[in-house]
Amino acid sequence: MGPSDVQSADEDCLSASPAQPVCCRSVPKRLIQDVTHTQVPGYDQRMVLSTVVPDAIWVSERAVWFAGVRLRARSTVVRLADRRLLIHSPPQPSRELCDALDALGQIAYLVVPNCFHHLATPAFAAKYPSATVVGPRSAAAKNPDLKLHQELHVDIVRAALPEFAALALDGCPFLDETVLFHRPTGSLIGADLVISACAKDHFTWRWAARLTGCYDRICVPPDVRSRTRPSADLAHAIDRMTSLPLERILVAHCDPIVDRPAAQLAEAWQFGGATRR
């Protein structure tokens, strides 16, 4: 992977594609891989969708530079009950990613999850002008190119997307994040809710993660923790998430969390008053 393949940004960047009906198309096998595919540092996944839950959830992964370290960043694709697609944290559009997404179905919703993961959404929205862009006002305030059709709010999600529950990460205004719980698959989908590094990651992030206690351990991102104080609102928000029937947690900067997801989430946020599970 060369320098042009790696995004440089202080805020995460994301990707897009032109919406077409699914028709008789099938997804090219070269563009879809199982999430268990062996990955190594530098493995180029920009052109690949990885299956998390068959016929329901996929992820797209790319590299981003943040604060001097190279992270793996993920966008999540969810098939809705009507067979259309929701893209959580849209990435920058590439032809290969667009082809894979178009073969899966029509893009219906683009979700900006917090005030950081918004940079590529305008490009994605330009590719898919019929898609509804949902996000927090704080993201639109930071990005004049970001045009929101709806605010990412509990009541709006309940009315438009009944298969999801929206849960605000109250008590953490630094992120202004709202996570989505996909009831049919038991998947909690967020962006910077938690983070972790492992042997697959670039040496810069492995080194930084060891220093910050995030290596092979699910943690709150260090910059988020340093700007967040314990509060009753925060504890209640995390307890609501951990009380859900979680099968997995999907976030931007670590692999799917399938081992004791509720317990690991509670442990990560215990400093904020979350109840251990």
Image (cartoon, grey):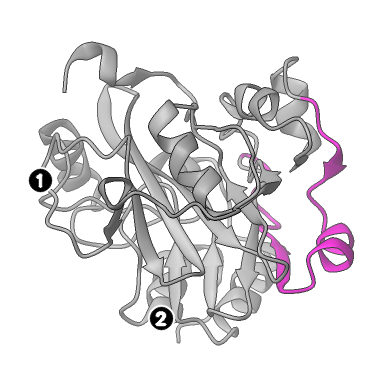
Q: Is residue 146 above or below residue 14?
A: above
* Quadrant of the snapshot with the C terminus: bottom left
In the image, residue 169 lies in the stretch drawn in magenta: yes
In terms of image quadrants, where is residue 24? Answer: bottom right
| Front residue of this view, candidates 142 and 72 | 72
Q: Mark 2 vs mark 1: which is more N-terminal?
A: 1
Q: Residue 40 carries which label?
A: 1
Residues shaded magenta: 147-174
Q: Which mark is residue 218?
A: none
Q: Callout 1, which amino acid? A: Val
| Front residue of this view, candidates 257 and 122 | 122
Q: Where is residue 202 in the image (x, y as percent from the top left)?
A: 15, 36
Q: Residue at x 60, y 81 (%)?
A: 184
Left or right for 274, reference 136: left
Q: Residue 263 carries which label?
A: 2
Categorize mark 2 by other alpha carbons within 10 Å: few (<14), some (14-19), many (20+).
some
Q: Callout 2, which amino acid? A: Ala
Closer to us: mark 2 or mark 1?
1
Q: Residue at x 89, y 66 (%)?
A: 159
Q: Is residue 246 above or below residue 13?
A: below
Alpha carbons under labels 2 and 1: distance apart: 27 Å
* Label 1: which secondary element: loop
Q: Residue at x 75, y 15 (%)?
A: 144
Left or right for 20, reference 269: right
* Label 2: which secondary element: helix
Q: In this view, does 126 lie above or below 150?
A: above
Left or right for 225, reference 260: right
